[in-house]
């Protein structure tokens, strides 16, 4: 009997597995070609998995909440050519027996595939699945504690059951304290060990509502806490006169709309200036791996976007340094539209080397953004406002109404010092201030 195995698709170079959120089809349901069968989640994004072949969903090989390796079968689909003959047989036939055996073979294949790939990292460090890490973060289990837990999986890999049992028994085990013999001399003062920080007690008032974080908000919260604890943040500020930029956009936006059928926003203009400055200061386009600095060849700019749910996502414009202003504008509009429609793919939000966030969209004049790890810097652009400013002319200083904005640049002070961080944001402002009012697009 002919059948098709739907496998977990590859969703980016750094993603090895995904969690099944929910099945959109039940066993026995008819499925059209390219119709979504299930929803999956990675540490990056949620997405749907379509089938390349039509037929009937014969068998689900995993349940909701299961973690599946990329490339492993998740379902068996009976193709269209075999549906009619299968429906005619209402009793148990030889074909039915063969089909049942095929399902068992597929299930054994999945089990063996998972066990064969469920190994520790080559470097010798233990491998932890996203599910185990999420449970550890939620329960306050540190990486040091995780490394001390003996896993029951293959090659002592930590399983969901292992981490849950550890959390359950953690509070039952008496704390052990190493004693140190100290001479009884009055000159020695022994201070008590510092107590671990405790969560503040939360009191609930009449009418208060408890809302549990959704999965994406939990991931964002963990990522933000990790970033702040990893990188010592420093922020530099610059005020820029973007009058020429504003006047040029006002002149060109209708032309661009009529010709390209899209809006010309400020974001691609900011990104172009950002890319130029990165070329001038390439050591801002780096990552830090222990004591090794990774200097990035490509300039991939992430643009923070707010979703309708209120959560934040950062789609990435790959190789932004190879695009002209028209290409940047189209890339920005495409990613922003797909973010609003929840149509981004895992690859769309990977590989960023520098991030821009436009807090001016919400009417904010400036902000102090948190670095998007493993990058080392992020820039925030504030709202553009008309303000009186002093201009130096050949006839003396004058006060004029100008379009002004603030740029905020947060950077990792382990590898980016004040000279580089401050010079970089100043260079971005220079490119924006010196915008050619007669430029064509």
Image (cartoon, helix red, strand yellow):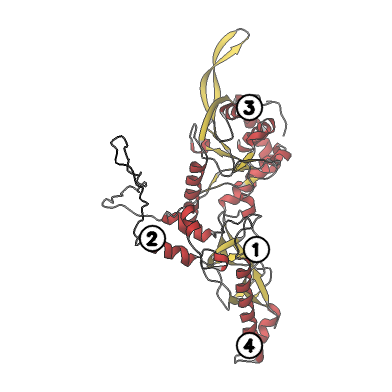
Tell me the residue at 50%/57% (across/down). Answer: 147
- Disc number for residue 427: 3
Front position among marks 4 and 2: 2
Residue 178 visible in the displayed image: yes
Q: Position of residue 172 (x, y in %)?
A: 34, 62
Front position among marks 2 and 3: 2
Q: Position of residue 64 (x, y in %)?
A: 51, 68
The answer to whether mark 1 and mark 4 are in CB contact below 8 A is no
Q: Is residue 310 left or right of residue 94?
A: left
- Disc number for residue 96: 4
**Secondary structure beneath label 2:** helix
> What residue is shown with label 2?
170
CA neighbours of label 1 inside 10 A, class few (<14), some (14 to 19), many (20+): some
> What residue is shown with label 1?
9
Judge by depth and name the residue closer to the eye, 213 or 371. 371
Judge by depth and name the residue closer to the eye, 251 or 228. 228
Q: Earlier in the sequence, mark 4 or mark 2?
A: 4
Front position among marks 1 and 2: 2
Q: CA distance from mark 1 to mark 3?
A: 42 Å
CA neighbours of label 4 inside 10 A, class few (<14), some (14 to 19), many (20+): some
Image quarter hosting the C terminus: top right
**Secondary structure beneath label 4:** helix
**Secondary structure beneath label 3:** helix
Q: Position of residue 286 (x, y in %)?
A: 64, 39
Q: Earlier in the sequence, mark 1 or mark 2?
A: 1
């Amino acid at each position: 009997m002919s059948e098709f195995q739907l496998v977990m698709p590859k969703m980016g170079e750094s993603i090895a597995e995904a969690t099944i959120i929910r099945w959109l089809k039940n066993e026995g349901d008819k499925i059209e070609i390219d119709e979504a069968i299930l929803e999956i989640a990675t540490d990056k994004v949620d997405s749907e998995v379509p089938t390349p072949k039509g037929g009937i969903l014969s068998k689900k090989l995993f349940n909701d909440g299961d973690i599946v390796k990329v490339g492993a079968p998740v379902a068996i689909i009976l193709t269209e050519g075999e549906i009619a003959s299968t429906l005619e047989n209402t009793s148990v036939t030889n074909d039915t027996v063969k089909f049942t055996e095929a399902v068992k073979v597929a299930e054994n294949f999945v089990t063996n595939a998972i066990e064969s790939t469920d190994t520790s990292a080559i470097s010798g460090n233990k491998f932890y699945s996203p599910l185990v890490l999420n449970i550890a973060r939620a329960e306050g289990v540190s990486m040091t504690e995780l490394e001390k837990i003996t896993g029951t999986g293959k090659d002592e890999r930590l399983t969901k059951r292992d981490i849950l049992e550890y959390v359950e028994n953690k509070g039952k085990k008496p704390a052990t304290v190493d004693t140190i013999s100290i001479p009884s001399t009055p000159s020695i003062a022994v201070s008590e060990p510092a107590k671990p920080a405790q969560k503040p007690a939360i009191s609930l008032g009449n009418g208060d509502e408890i809302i549990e974080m959704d999965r994406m908000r939990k991931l964002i919260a963990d990522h933000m806490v990790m970033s702040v604890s990893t990188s010592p943040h420093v922020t530099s500020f610059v005020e820029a006169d973007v009058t020429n930029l504003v006047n040029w956009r006002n002149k060109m936006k209708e032309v661009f709309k009529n010709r390209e059928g899209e809006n010309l926003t400020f974001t691609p203009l900011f990104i172009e200036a950002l890319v130029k400055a990165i070329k001038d200061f390439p050591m801002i386009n780096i990552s830090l791996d222990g004591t090794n600095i990774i200097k990035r060849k490509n300039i991939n700019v992430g643009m923070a976007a707010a979703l309708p749910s209120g959560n934040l996502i950062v789609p990435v414009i790959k190789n932004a340094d190879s695009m002209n202003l028209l290409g940047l504008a189209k890339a920005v509009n495409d990613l922003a539209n797909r973010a609003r429609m929840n149509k981004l793919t895992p690859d769309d939000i990977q590989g960023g080397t520098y991030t821009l966030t436009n807090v001016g969209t919400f009417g904010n004049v400036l902000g102090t953004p948190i670095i998007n790890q493993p990058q080392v810097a992020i820039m925030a652009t504030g709202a553009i406002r008309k303000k009186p400013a002093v201009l130096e002319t050949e006839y003396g200083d004058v006060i004029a109404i100008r379009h002004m904005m603030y740029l905020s640049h947060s950077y990792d002070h382990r590898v980016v010092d004040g000279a580089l961080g401050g010079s970089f944001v100043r260079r971005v402002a220079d490119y924006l201030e010196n915008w050619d009012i007669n430029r064509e697009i």
